[in-house]
Amino acid sequence: MAHAEHAENSREDYFPHGSRLPFFGSISLFVLMAGAAATLNGAQVGPWVLTTGLLLLFTLFFLWFGEVIRENQAGLYNEQVDRSFRMGMMWFIFSEVMFFAAFFGALFYARQLSVPWLGGEGAKAVTSILWPEFDAGWPSSGPGHLGPRDDGSYEIIPAFGLPALNTALLLTSGLTLTIAHHAMKSAHRGILKVFLALTFVLGFIFLGVQVFEYGHAWSDLGLQLGTGIYGSTFFMLTGFHGLHVMVGAIMLVVIWLRCMKGHFTPRQHFAFEAVAWYWHFVDVVWLGLFIFVYWI
């Protein structure tokens, strides 16, 4: 019951001890990104470095989550620390909004400005002299007809197929998470555990469908990362979103395990709320992807 009593027993001031985990996290992310870059460029060592980076990242989650959970259960966190957690999560999600805004901005620039310019439209129409026969339609592999096929041809993934299925999965997961949150606040632990489990199961099914979609696009449709501007923006946007879904699903599993151990109360459960904020953000981003990448 340490968590339930933390409001009465917590100290006036809490100063966290020094931690090496932020430095460990920086190393983990560096190895992960180096492995991803090496893999995408066909280096033989790439998959091994990428796997090492993932293992380091999962180790970081385990160590850091465990440390925060132990401090919380010991009643070390007062209201000021709770507010700092909330503000930190708000700023983190804002940074994520800006992250995806940059990617959507790149998509807008390529689709509405640079590709039409190459086709002879707009204020910079003089660029059409470089590629006089270029048809500035969208989606486009660019005037160089880049891609795995000799003629630069490729096929796109229809919106109302696997992407629509994934949209239904994520929207449903948002609903199950909301039900779990209400169950948490009303102390219905059984409903909480069931619907929280449904949420991360739906998230992992989403990831499985996306992996299948990537394999189909890469092998059968001629749509790869190097398929011009459309291929690069498609995999950049959907790939980074998939990474966020994976991280969110892992965090949901951690929260579910804590619920199984009896952590949280109807009044004290910010860790649950923080992950819920993150998951709903991921849902909203996917709606933008479905509309502007797959549909329109």
Image (spheres, rainbow, N blue to C red):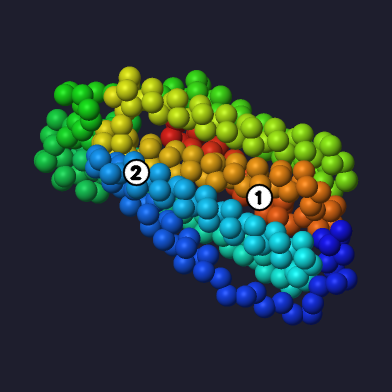
> Quick one: 72 or 127, which is closer to the camera?
72
* Element class at badge 2: helix
Q: Residues within 10 Å of mark 1 (few under 14, many from 20)?
A: many
Q: Quadrant of the N terminus?
A: bottom right
Which amino acid, by three-letter code, is at mark 2?
A: Trp
Counting the numbered discs, the total is 2
Which mark identifies residue 275? 1
Q: Residue at x 66, y 50 (%)?
A: 275
Looking at the image, is 223 positioned above or below residue 179? above
Q: Is residue 73 left or right of residue 241?
A: right
Looking at the image, is 166 positioned above or below residue 75? above
Mark 2 sits on what residue? 48
Which amino acid, by three-letter code, is at mark 1?
A: Val
Q: Is residue 241 left or right of residue 134?
A: right
* Element class at badge 1: helix
Q: Marks 1 and 2: which is nearer the front?
A: 2
- Residue 70 can be seen in this image: yes
Looking at the image, is 9 positioned above or below residue 176? below
Q: Residue furthest bottom?
A: 13
Q: Residue at x 47, y 67 (%)?
A: 23
Q: Residue 282's x, y, as percent? A: 57, 44
Q: Residue 178's x, y, as percent? A: 74, 41
Q: Residue 266's x, y, as percent? A: 85, 52
Q: Residue at x 80, y 40 (%)?
A: 192
Q: Residue at x 55, y 46 (%)?
A: 247
The CA distance from mark 1 to mark 2 is 30 Å
Q: Quadrant of the C terminus?
A: top left
Quarter-of-image position of residue 294 = top left
> Quick one: 5 or 249, which is closer to the camera?
5
